[in-house]
Amino acid sequence: MALVHGGQLQQVAKQYNIPTQDWLDLSTGIAPISYPIPPIPNSAWQQLPQHNVDLVNAAKHYYQCSELVVTNGSQAIIKALPTLYQQQNPNSKHVYLPERGYKEHAQAWKVAGYKLHFYQDSLPELTQLPVNCVVVIINPNNPTGQFFKLELISQYHCALKKLNGLLVVDEAFIDVMPTEQSYCTLANDNYVLVLRSFGKFFGLAGIRIGFLVANEHWCNTFKELLGPWQVNNPAQIIAEQALVDTNWQKTQKAKLNELTTAQVEMFRQVFTDYILLDIKGCDLFLTLSFKQPTTAKQLYHLLCQQAVYCRLADEQDTLRFGIVTTDSIKRLEKALQLACAQITYLKPYNLIAL
Ligand SMILES: Cc1ncc(COP(=O)(O)O)c(C=O)c1O
């Protein structure tokens, strides 16, 4: 069954009977500022995509690695990996995943017949990992924002090597974190894969390009599996330029941090301590948890009625907001104020406070 994701605006717009162009869509963790699209030569549209050495070199430099595969988004690897790994290591039966996290991972391992084990805030006990197992770490996690240090991830890498297992590090949102925290530089044996998403930080999820950072064996295996023409020429041209544009990257990082700080401040002003429990996330999204279990669902509905679309967790207890631009923050603030005033069960709380 298809999973629910952010970015399903058409469906939500239809549900609330509001034209799509009227919505403020904050339902994904895609940067609200996009890398400017360079001119695309006609030949890029006309010809079949070739192996692009310049793109590969730009990506190797940006991701600080010696081998990688260019893919049609990191999702392509997430979907293909379990069956492939099962063929390579038929004794592998168990996978450890974050209980809250991008659900496509769990779905893919489940389809391949794996037994799923979910961990919560801390990674599974090293001593309890069985031989041939797989550990998936989403760093930083979407939607919880939880971030594991490189040193800790490295312990899991070492352990999985001894256990003949596999470590998968999904770094879809790591571009906004300190560069030295990425595991890409250490993805150099058969026991680790790192996934990088291009669309989020560069604000261009629609062009569908991503990268697998791994050793030569894994890269060759995936190249063979995925076949030619994974990524169209225009996407390759855009990514190549964006990955070498260090000035734009620096500005983007600073801008996202500035916008995130303003958004957190606004959230804290709008929500009283009686409503809000916590704000977590990174500079690409913010996840809000609440003191009462039904608040998230109510707020989601009240915001949708005002054409503001955020992501209600599958568990229905948190809301994830993409980062809002300076132009739109007032609109979000007003919608939240109105929504807060309409949450029905807040009244008893307010009375207690009085
Ligand atoms: C944690 C995580 N990993 C991977 C992906 C897949 O992204 P893409 O295929 O655009 O690289 C997503 C998409 O939202 C995600 O949230």
Image (spheres, rainbow, N blue to C red):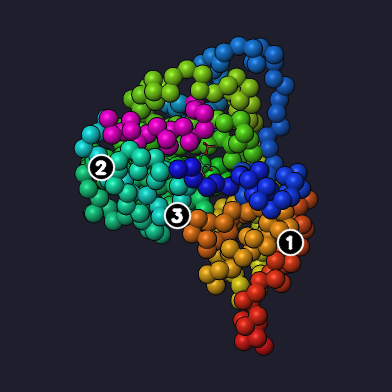
- Residue 215 vs residue 42, the one in the foreground: 42
Residue depicted at 39% across the width and 23% down the height: 225
Quick check: marks 2 and 3 in contact, CB under 8 Å? no
Q: CA distance from mark 2 to mark 3?
A: 21 Å
Q: Amino acid at mark 1?
A: Ala
Which residue in the protein does label 1 denote? 335
Q: Amino acid at mark 3?
A: Arg
Which residue in the protein does label 2 denote? 93
Q: Taking the image as drawn, is residue 212 in sight?
A: yes
Residue 100 tag number = 3
For residue 236, above or below residue 122: above
Magenta span contains residue 78: yes
- Residue 348 vs residue 267, the one in the foreground: 348
The magenta stretch is 70-87
Tell me residue 288's x, y (percent).
58, 62
For the N terminus, give its image quadrant. top left
Q: Secondary structure at mark 2?
A: loop
Q: Secondary structure at mark 1?
A: helix
Tell me residue 140's x, y (percent).
49, 49
For residue 46, above or below residue 21: above
Disc 1 crowd, CA 10 A, few/some/many (<14, 14-19, 20+):
many
Magenta span contains residue 350: no
Q: Taking the image as drawn, is residue 155 in sight?
A: no
Q: Quadrant of residue 200?
A: top right
Q: Amino acid at mark 2?
A: Lys
Q: CA distance from mark 2 to mark 1?
A: 47 Å
Of mark 2 and mark 3, the one earlier in the sequence is 2
Q: CA distance from mark 1 to mark 3?
A: 27 Å
Residue depicted at 73% across the width and 61% down the height: 335
Residue depicted at 52% across the width and 69% down the height: 293
For the C terminus, give its image quadrant. bottom right
